[in-house]
Amino acid sequence: MSRRAPGERLRTVRRACLLDAPADVVWRALRAPATLVHVAAPVLRMPALERRDRSWQPGEPVTTWLLLFGLLPVSRHTVVIEALDDAAMTVRTEERGGPVSVWRHRITVEPAGPGRCRYTDEVEIGAGPLTGPVRVLASGFFRWRQHRWQRLARVLAAATRP
């Protein structure tokens, strides 16, 4: 799926955080597109995902507009789930849109003690001469998303307590 130019240099962003919810609970939430919509808001809106009422399906492309703060169209963005491993609690996507020709995203959820887990975003980015700035934006966006995940995890954990 990638449109990587020969010789294009890729950059990697890796960011992890601890969530106060069991790994299996976070993993179930991660499988729902509505969760991505929630943790990306209000920085990014993805209208096609807001209307999606079923889980991610490996190999199925999903294309949506990325709307900055819900107003400014940034680009059309296509996501394909390359692998969805329930046993390892890992998802790998191949994405592209606008100036971004390569966006290989891996999300991992790992147990980190009783009632906690480690959530990790790792993305490989290629956007030609814009790769550096896109990398900086991605890092900031993941920081925001993980902040939202931390808040959501507390709600998810509370909902699963007896």
Image (cartoon, grey):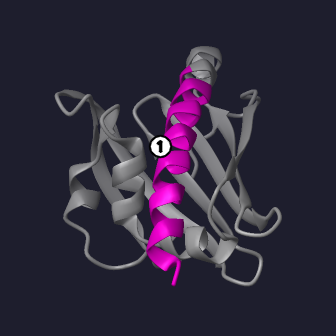
- Where is the N terminus found, in terms of image quarters? bottom right
Q: Is residue 140 magenta?
A: yes
Question: Residue 61 placed where, x, y %?
Answer: 41, 66
Question: Residue 43 placed where, x, y %?
Answer: 35, 31
Image: 99 above or below 32: above
Question: Residue 144 placed where, x, y %?
Answer: 50, 33
Q: How would you rate the neighbour count of disc 1 (Cα within 10 Å): few for under 14, some for 14-19, many for 20 or more?
A: some
Q: Secondary structure at mark 1?
A: helix
Q: Is residue 160 magenta?
A: yes
Report the amino acid beneath label 1: Arg
**In the displayed structure, does residue 102 sit left or right of residue 31?**
right
Image: 53 above or below 99: below
Kindly give the residue lying farthest to the right in the view shown: 113
Q: Name the image quarter holding residue 115.
A: bottom right
Q: Number of callouts in the render?
A: 1
What residue lies at 64% left-to-right and 49% top-to-bottom?
104
Question: Residue 72 placed where, x, y %?
Answer: 21, 25
Q: Nearer the viewer, residue 76 or 146?
A: 146
What residue lies at 66% left-to-right and 70% top-to-bottom?
22
Image: 70 above or below 109: above
**In the displayed structure, does residue 135 sit left or right of residue 38?**
right
Q: Name the image quarter holding residue 128.
A: top right
Q: Which residue is mark 1?
A: 148
Q: Which residues are magenta?
A: 137-162
Looking at the magenta stretch, what is its main secondary structure? helix
Q: Nearer the viewer, residue 12 or 69?
A: 69
What residue lies at 33% left-to-right and 63% top-to-bottom?
34
What residue lies at 58% left-to-right and 49% top-to-bottom?
2
